[in-house]
Image: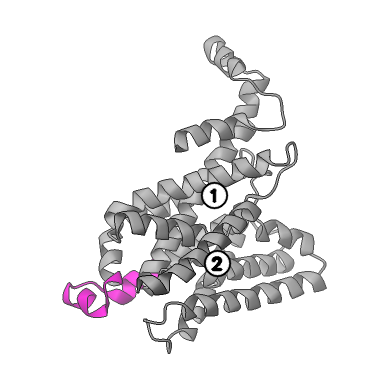
Amino acid sequence: MMGLLVLLSLSIGVADFSWSGIFHSLINHSANSDSSLMLVSRLPRTIAIILTGIAMAVAGMIMQVVLKNRFVEPSMVGATQSAALGLLVVSLLFPASALLVKMSVATVSAVFGMMLFMLLIRRIPPTDYLMIPLIGIVFGGIIEAVTTFIAYQTETLQMLSVWQFGDFSGVLAGRYELLWLTGALCVLAYIIADKLTIVGLGDNIALNLGISKRQVTWLGVGMVAMMSAVVVVTVGMIPFIGLVVPNIVSRLMGDKLRRSLPAVALLGASAVLLCDIIGRSIRYPFEVPVATVFGVVGTVLFLWLLLRAPAER
């Protein structure tokens, strides 16, 4: 299915494009308008979509394991909102700073936001599955309100909207390469998948098996913060990927991360590809941001998960 979605993503667009021109370019070893369009726009956009879907889905899986709650994801614990706040502040104070500096500040802001959220939920019993995501939604809303107020006072609402709504229409060659860093972090998550699984089984089990819960937890939090920051800096926020995709995979394949992480990555990339294709098709030649499309689908699925969970328990 993902292979078909990739072909559709490469084929759909406003500019005139034909696969025959690509084949002629390959046979004659010469560039033409079709090959240039493919290399400059279509292929970078598709790669960015795939990397974003993989990163947010894996980040959501890590958050759910670390917090032992199936109803959380980076946008529900203040990670993406804190990253956007840090990005806005550094853009106002140091507008000429390099992209790497902005990404670093956004990562640190995301870590602080997640730390504050984890302090807020310390007194909540782990069995109260629904209270934690509700607190996270309120917490993220407060951070987003502060960010919007700062942007309103400094007349930077238009710049902020670029980070708040995930959109791939501006992705070109040279503007998405930071997302490869999230791919490396996903590989690292697969390497430490067994340790994350043990931490998710409980504190006593992790202690008996010689796993440092604190180290693994902070490593997971740092990875989630960096993934969220890179995605926000590059394409903007896309909610519910890290919530819906891991829940679907865990219901089908269980909670062993070594086995389920590849499926989470594949389904996350396919879901974002599908929503992006829908966004490009329903108002052609105009585009609906992928965050809007996935937000509608994700909201429905999230409510279904919330309403179904009590009956299962």
Dot 2: what SS?
A: helix
In the depicted structure, whether residue 107 falls above or below residue 47: below
- Residue at image location 51% in from the left, 47% down from the top: 271
Q: Nearer the viewer, residue 218 or 164?
A: 164
Q: Earlier in the sequence, mark 1 or mark 2?
A: 2
Q: Which of 184 and 312 is in front in this view?
A: 312
Which residue is the site of mark 1? 178
Name the outermost residue toward the front: 311
Q: Position of residue 60 (x, y in %)?
A: 45, 62
Indicate the position of residue 286 as horizontal and vertical percent values.
75, 41
- Residue 9, how many percent across, how many down? 58, 35
Determine if the magenta segment contains residue 214.
yes
Identify the residue position indicated by label 2 in the image: 75
Q: Identify which residue, 234 or 13, lies in the foreground.
A: 13
| Residue found 17% across the figure and 77% down from its top | 208
Find residue 212 and report its horizontal and vertical position in percent.
Answer: 26, 74
Give the amino acid type for the residue marked by disc 1 in the picture: Leu
In this rendering, position of residue 285 left or right of residue 248: right
Magenta stretch? 200-220
Residue that sits furthest to the top in the current view: 28
> Which quarter of the image is occupied by the C terminus?
bottom left
